[in-house]
Structure formats: C-alpha cells, structure tokens
Image (cartoon, grey):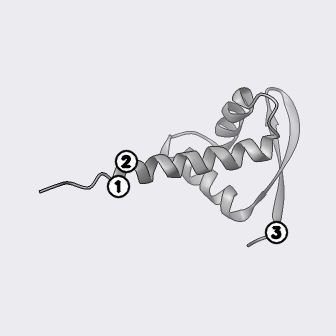
Amino acid sequence: MSAERKRSLSIAGHRTSVSLEDAFWDALKEIAAAEGRSITALVAEVDSRRGETNLSSALRLHALAHYQRLVDGSSGAKSD
C-alpha cells in the first residue's frame, strides 16, 4: 500500500489539505473524469455532504461506494 499523499485544494473559498493514498487519488480522478468535472468539484461535493465525517474518510467512502455501484450494476447474472 502506498503512503498518503497530501494535496492542497480550494473548496468553498478556503484552502484545505487532504491526505489520501495514491490509489484513492487515482480513483477520484477517474470518477471526476467519468462525470465530466474536475477533482476539485468532486471533492467540494463530497465535502458539502460529509457531515461530521473527516474529509479524507468521506472521500475514501465515496470512491468505495462508486466502485461498489459499478460492481453491483455489472454482476446481474442472467438465468437461462
């Protein structure tokens, strides 16, 4: 597993730093690209919905939920 990488972003008019493993940064970039938006816009959306959850944790959970939806959507086995 890779070490956490800290990145600085501007969200809702303020600067913040987020530490995530490279695999999560890559996943968030992929998700943002698939949705046609920037990673900053994706992080801002997650930030606005996270409640009391730590932003890094909320981003990890968002990526996990995204890929779980993909798996659930593609695992519908057809019966004969």
Q: Which residue is drawn at 55% across and 48% down?
A: 31
Label of residue 62 in the image = none
The disc labelled 1 sits on which kind of residue? Ser
Which mark's residue is nearer the viewer, 3 or 2? 2
Q: Mark 3 points at which residue?
A: 3
Q: Are marks 3 and 1 in contact (CB under 8 Å)?
A: no
First in sequence: mark 3 vs mark 1: 3
The disc labelled 2 sits on which kind of residue? Gly
First in sequence: mark 3 vs mark 2: 3
Which residue is more in the foreground, 4 or 57?
57
Please state the horizontal and vertical placement of residue 70, each as a whole percent of the image.
44, 50
Q: Name the residue under label 1.
A: 75
Mark 2: give few (<14), some (14-19) or many (20+) Cα within 10 Å.
Answer: few
Q: Mark 2 points at which residue?
A: 73
Q: Residue at x 79, y 36 (%)?
A: 53
Q: Are marks 2 and 1 in contact (CB under 8 Å)?
A: yes
The residue sitting at the bottom extreme is 1
Helix, strand or loop at disc 3? loop
Mark 3: give few (<14), some (14-19) or many (20+) Cα within 10 Å.
Answer: few
Distance between mark 2 and mark 1 Cα atoms: 6 Å
**Which quarter of the rendering shows the C terminus?**
bottom left
Helix, strand or loop at disc 1? loop
